[in-house]
Image: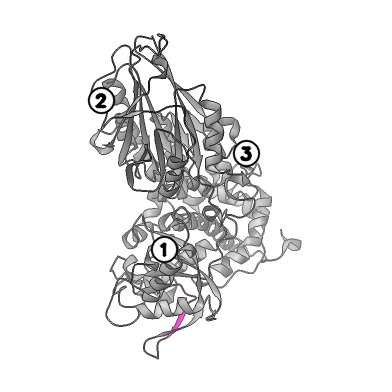
Amino acid sequence: DSIAANVNAHHATSVSSEPPPPSESRLIVLAITDVYTLQNLASFKTLVEQTREQYPGAKVISMLTGDFLSPYLLSAIDQGKGMMHALNSIPLDYITWGNHEADIKHSVVCEHVRNFKGTWINSNMISHEAMDHQVEYAIVDVPSPDGSSVRTVGLVAVMSNDPKLYANFKPPGAFGGATITDPWEALAKYQILLEKETDLIIPLQHLYVPDDHITCEKFDFPVVLSGHDHHRVDETIQGTRLLKPGMNAVYATMLEISWSNIPTMDASGGDDHGKEPPTIGAKFVSVEDFPADPVLDEANERAYDALEPLRNTELARVPSKYEPLSSDNSRGSVCTMGTYICSLLKSSMSVTRRQHSYRIDAVLLMGGNIRGNASYDQDSFFSLEMLESEIKENEVVAVVDMPGWLLADGIQATHIGEPTPGWMQYDFGVEEDTTVSPPVVTKVNSRDLDREKIYRVATKIGDLTNGQSPPWTEYYKAHPEDLPPQGAYTNIHSELMSYFGRNLWRKLWDAISEIIQNEGMEKGCHCEFRLGQLDSDGDGTITVQDLQKGLEELLGYSIDDRETTLAEFVHRFADTTGDGKVRQQDFEQFCHEILETYERDSWRLDHPKPAYTRRSTIS
């Protein structure tokens, strides 16, 4: 049943081109959502400023309805630092949660919440650790230019509590274990609270369209501003207008709500203008049509400097058996680049000390996703530049349960006949018997194939139903409930850059291991010695500046002294306790993890595994 809201509304076809007359109360909302790049934010700042100039007397507010800290290439290294600087520089008035804000370290997210200069609205996750810097709802005052009337608009923000979105998080769970309550229960709660205090309530949602429709059907709100889906939506469901501007601030929603405040007489002869319904108009605005604010544009470009040291630097060792790397004929054969990238993804998604726990058995990517069509020189190294040339920046994977027989039959179906975009690439743990035609999968996860076992497979979810592998298409079209939701997808660039960043700490460890060997010291962790190699002032604590120096002197990275983002990322990973400091106990913890690290990455590390002692003999 529909729950009556506090107001009806007149819907206009678009927005006014003129400022409000003296007695009119007008609110203009500029909303963006699902922003995974800084590219358009400097232009969005100009849009906000020019809208305020064009409509003097109107109340103009800006907002972002979730998904901005992850997943994208830059945030994998800077953990949202560049994004939050840009949003504060607009300055953005309101922000709400998206599910991907859980993807980065919880303590870092809390720090971003506390440093946000605008208002962070959170209506259905109020047990969040940083709730003291958030509000459960917001009320916006909308005065008329002449001051004769003030209207009020309530803002309530909800996000999805779908457990599938958070299934891969380790305890205590996503958002540091905070409870995400039912979004519609939260809307009902705050509607009761706000309907007597405000003239209108606007739900700000991070939900998929079908869930947005539930809001439209269950309530009688005149308009809903939402995100989560990456395409534009402008539709009216049972009298409620649903607006989504699409991803990356390419477009912004411009929502205009106005009250004329012209006195009318009710049946008893009294003034009834307080019950006057508002007029609501909306349109999508192309953000790139507005010139970029030069100061913010320069700051955003500088934020991406964090990636420059990685662009032409070895990010991961290439095993000799994969040399020379080649993506030639990736649509007609299993190429070395395809196997290498799938194997890197498997290693990355199997890292123990991270918020997610995927437990991956195999990574499968169709050949059309390996797009470089290039042969690389012998002894070349895998760099960010190479990654960007081979995998599109918006390519995503997710984990799906797949029966062994389906995995094998699906791969085999793509390895028959002429080259096709669906030709399957796989990680080092998958093997085929190529002495028969068509080839037959014999191993998964380096073990004999069990056709009855359910395997955990990371792959492009869209490829499961695109027809390139008929067995997959038939099965998953018949069982769509087995497919993960879009919000559980992982960006390949972001995933691998996080892996490479974590790998830098291991490379520093190895560089000091060489020093230990050259010093003629006995084999062992030698944590106190390792700490001393990086601790420039001898205070027993490794700082970001110490790591910056180590990256330059031990690994040969050329980094601008002003750009510490890469060192900050390594520092966060080296800090095993999460207290913001790297001390000897963190080295001792990593000493135990290094054994697992070498085992997980043994497929690509061409040198003998170093011998490490157990804790009882740590020096």
- Mark 2 lies on residue: 16
Horizontal side of residue 24 vs 185, given as left or right? left
- Classify mark 3: helix, strand or loop: loop
Q: Are there few (<14), some (14-19), or many (20+) residues within 10 Å of tag 1?
A: many
Horizontal side of residue 574 vs 72, given as left or right? right
Query: What main secondary structure does the magenta stretch of the protein show?
Result: loop
**Image height check: is 273 above or below 46?**
above
Magenta span includes 504: no
The amino acid beneath tag 1 is Ile
Mark nearest the camera among 3 and 2 is 2
**Quadrant including the C terminus:** bottom right
- Mark 1 lies on residue: 461
**Image height check: is 119 above or below 612?**
above
Q: Which one is in front, 242 or 55?
A: 242
Residue 391 percent across, percent down from the top left: 35, 61
Residue 12 image-quadrant placement: top left
Magenta span includes 433: yes
- Mark 3 lies on residue: 127
Residue 407 percent across, percent down from the top left: 46, 76
User: Of callouts 3 and 2, which one flags the residue occurring earlier in the amino acid sequence?
Assistant: 2
Residue segment shown in magenta: 427-435
Q: Are there few (<14), some (14-19), or many (20+) residues within 10 Å of tag 3?
A: some
- Classify mark 1: helix, strand or loop: helix
Q: Are there few (<14), some (14-19), or many (20+) residues within 10 Å of tag 2?
A: few
User: Of callouts 1 and 3, which one flags the residue occurring earlier in the amino acid sequence?
Assistant: 3
The amino acid beneath tag 2 is Ser
Distance of label 1 from label 2 (alpha carbons): 43 Å
The amino acid beneath tag 3 is Ser
Q: Which residue is drawn at 62% across and 66% down?
A: 595
